[in-house]
Image (cartoon, grey):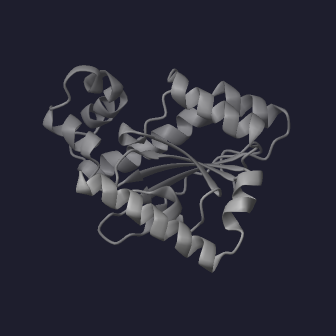
Amino acid sequence: MTDIAQLLRNNIAWAERVERDHPGFFRKLERQHKPKFLWIGCADSRVPADQLTGVMPGEVFVHRNIANQVINTDMNLMCVLQYAIDVLRVEHIIVCGHSRCGGIEAVMRGTTPGVLDHWLESVRRLVEAHPEADVDDIGQLNVRHGVESLAHNVLVRRAWSRGRRLLLHGWFYSIANGRLQDLGVSRGPQSENAP
């Protein structure tokens, strides 16, 4: 039980530190929610979007799942995507994978029982298509696949047809050195590759 209590104590210390360093931050945050970014990342606890990008709470709208999957029939993701596009009017959607992804490693080892086996089906297809690839190669291919799926998503396409400047990006995070890498697969409404 002390671990849970410690989390609550950590929260108090964090809130006090934020308020001291940024007076009025929480009152301002309470009144507005206008992030420019939607982050689609892995549920891995080592990959926190706001900390990796050095931004404060409220600047990145986040959706996380096992192995940062972009599955256009996933109702949870589709609701997040629609809310981000139509309500929050985000300008950028980032699909971010990471090194040593446990979900991808499980697929490569053949240890994905039950529902997880179904969830990671697209990763399995990548592994089968690239038998020589290591876990990080598959992780990067998975991000590329996610960006491509978003580029064909009806919600994204409708936003583009309405003239929205909505840009898609594929990034990869190295847990070993804490660095984000742009995979150079950005997409936008005007061309195959966005600036």
- The answer to whether residue 22 is visible is yes
x and y percent of residue 33 in the render?
72, 50
* Whether residue 27 is situated above or below residue 107 in the rendered picture: below
x and y percent of residue 188 in the render?
70, 46
- The answer to whether residue 152 is visible is no
Residue drawn at x 69%, y 28% as measured from the top left: 155
* Whether residue 6 is situated above or below residue 191 in the rendered picture: below
Give the quadrant of residue 154. top right
Residue drawn at x 76%, y 29% as measured from the top left: 158
Give the quadrant of residue 116. top left
Indicate left or right for 30 with 52 as reference. Answer: right
Q: Nearer the viewer, residue 167 or 76?
A: 76
x and y percent of residue 47 in the render?
40, 56
Q: Nearer the viewer, residue 180 or 20?
A: 20
x and y percent of residue 17 in the render?
54, 75
Residue drawn at x 53%, y 27% as measured from the top left: 76
